[in-house]
Image: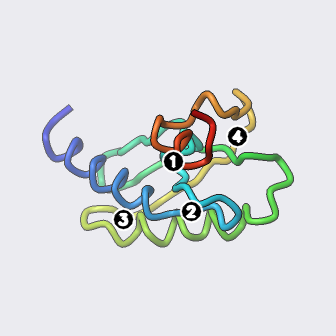
Amino acid sequence: MNNEFLELEEKIVAMLKTVFDPEIPVNIYDLGLIYNIEVKEGGEVVITMTLTAPNCPAADFIVEDVKMKIESVEGVKKVDVNIVFEPEWNKDRMSEEAKLELGFL
């Protein structure tokens, strides 16, 4: 991986940390909802993510927010967001900060 890709990935992660599930005061990255970030040639980005619950009422809002914010990153031309429920999300996927914030530690 060259530096350009790594820099782009860092910027994408920084953007993902500004996306929140409206019902949880922790960003989706620290919640562990992002399973994979794939940066392809030509500025195409594929995000594989999950939701805290399959019937999450904020799903559309979150996906739109992710797309909008990542599309605003310099160098990104196209964003695809894949929602998956395998492996199933659980609180073990959360960062230490998120667990602390939500009172799990």
In the picture of the structure, the residue carrying the numbered disc 3 is: 77
Q: Between residues 100 and 25, which one lies in front from this camera angle?
A: 100
Q: Are marks 1 and 4 in contact (CB under 8 Å)?
A: no
Q: Position of residue 93 (x, y in %)?
A: 58, 31
Sequence-wise first label, 1 or 3 = 1
Q: Give left or right: position of 11 versus 105.
A: left
SS label for mark 3:
loop
Relative vertical location of residue 88 with respect to residue 74 in this rendering, above or below: above
Q: Are marks 4 and 2 in contact (CB under 8 Å)?
A: no
Task: Name the residue: 39% across, 54% down.
Answer: 44
In the picture of the structure, the residue carrying the numbered disc 1 is: 47
Q: Between residues 15 and 99, which one lies in front from this camera angle?
A: 99
Q: Give left or right: position of 40 versus 94.
A: left
Sequence-wise first label, 4 or 2 = 2
In the picture of the structure, the residue carrying the numbered disc 4 is: 84
For the view shown, which residue lies furthest in the right direction? Answer: 55
Marks 2 and 3, how far apart at CA: 23 Å
| Residue 48 can be seen in this image | no
Marks 1 and 2, how far apart at CA: 16 Å
Q: Give the number of the disc on residue 20.
A: 2
Q: Classify 10 Å Cα crowding around label 3: few (below 14), some (14-19), many (20 and above).
A: few
Q: Position of residue 102 (x, y in %)?
A: 61, 47
SS label for mark 4:
loop
Amino acid type, label 2: Phe
Relative vertical location of residue 33 with respect to residue 26 in this rendering, above or below: above
Q: Where is residue 73, by image quadrant?
A: bottom left
Q: Classify 10 Å Cα crowding around label 2: few (below 14), some (14-19), many (20 and above).
A: many
Sequence-wise first label, 2 or 3 = 2
Sequence-wise first label, 4 or 3 = 3
